[in-house]
Image (cartoon, rainbow, N blue to C red):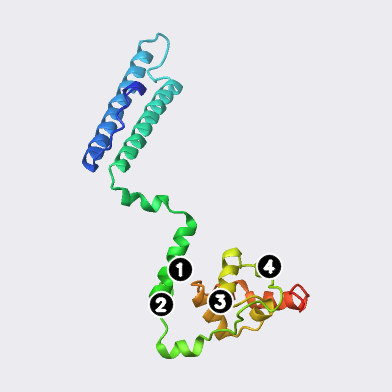
Amino acid sequence: MKSQDLPQDNSPLSPWEYWRESLSAWSDFSQRAAHIMTSQLGQSAAAPGRSVDPDADTLASELLRSLSDLNLRHWQNTARLLESFPSWMNLPNTLTGSALVDWYDNFYRADGASPLQPAHEAGDEAETLSAPATLIKPDGKADDLTQIKGIGPKRSNQLNALGIFHFRQIAGWTEAETRWVDDYLASPGRVSRDGWVQQARLLTANGSATQH
């Protein structure tokens, strides 16, 4: 199989044609490899004063070139196969990372339970979840919540929409309120894992919070 023998057709391939083309490609490679080895053996045997062993460098170079052609042919056929798929099958490849995160968040809230954790019993919900105190608007100037590790601009906006604007609000969360915020943000264990409450207390104690 030589480079100029690679298929130039870019039309879509059906799965059956892809499978048949793959078998053909491997068959061509096997025949090409056998021809190269036979040719090298013949040349070595015909050369006076040389052993019957083929030239290892030449043999390896020819085989690698043939293998490279096989690889190119495979990926070209794979691209043609993907083009034969319906457009909706390629939709996941066009989505950004943030779109997938938003989809997961919406799915989690609609389902009412994290797929990574067992659902709470109705009685447990009342014991472990409790909404924190919120504000309708900031008490003066809102604190920059992104100073807390684990809170980016998106999380900060979500907290502001909830009514959380200040470090002192986060610093006063109880365990039940922390669990409630985790559930609201669709991020099980995130608040505790990143230590939002402890960080907020330090920021408040160090005077990083907005003075009122």
Picture quadrant where residue 162 is located: bottom right
Category of crowding for the residue at label 2, using alpha-carbon neighbours closer than 10 angstroms: few (below 14), some (14–19), many (at least 20):
some
Nearer the viewer's eye, disc 3 or disc 1?
Answer: 3
Label 2 with label 1: CB-CB less than 8 Å? no
Q: CA distance from mark 1 to mark 4?
A: 23 Å
Residue to which mark 4 is pinned: 147
Identify the amino acid type marked 2: Gly
Category of crowding for the residue at label 3, using alpha-carbon neighbours closer than 10 angstroms: few (below 14), some (14–19), many (at least 20):
some
Q: CA distance from mark 3 to mark 1?
A: 16 Å
Label 3 with label 2: CB-CB less than 8 Å? no
Category of crowding for the residue at label 1, using alpha-carbon neighbours closer than 10 angstroms: few (below 14), some (14–19), many (at least 20):
some
Q: Is residue 49 left or right of residue 8?
A: right
Residue to which mark 3 is pinned: 162
Residue to which mark 2 is pinned: 112
Residue to which mark 1 is pinned: 105
Nearer the viewer's eye, disc 3 or disc 2?
Answer: 3
Mark 3 or mark 1, earlier in chain:
1
Callout 4: SS: helix
Q: CA distance from mark 3 to mark 2?
A: 18 Å
Mark 2 or mark 4, earlier in chain:
2
Residue in view at x 71 percent, y 76 percent: 140
Identify the amino acid type marked 4: Gln
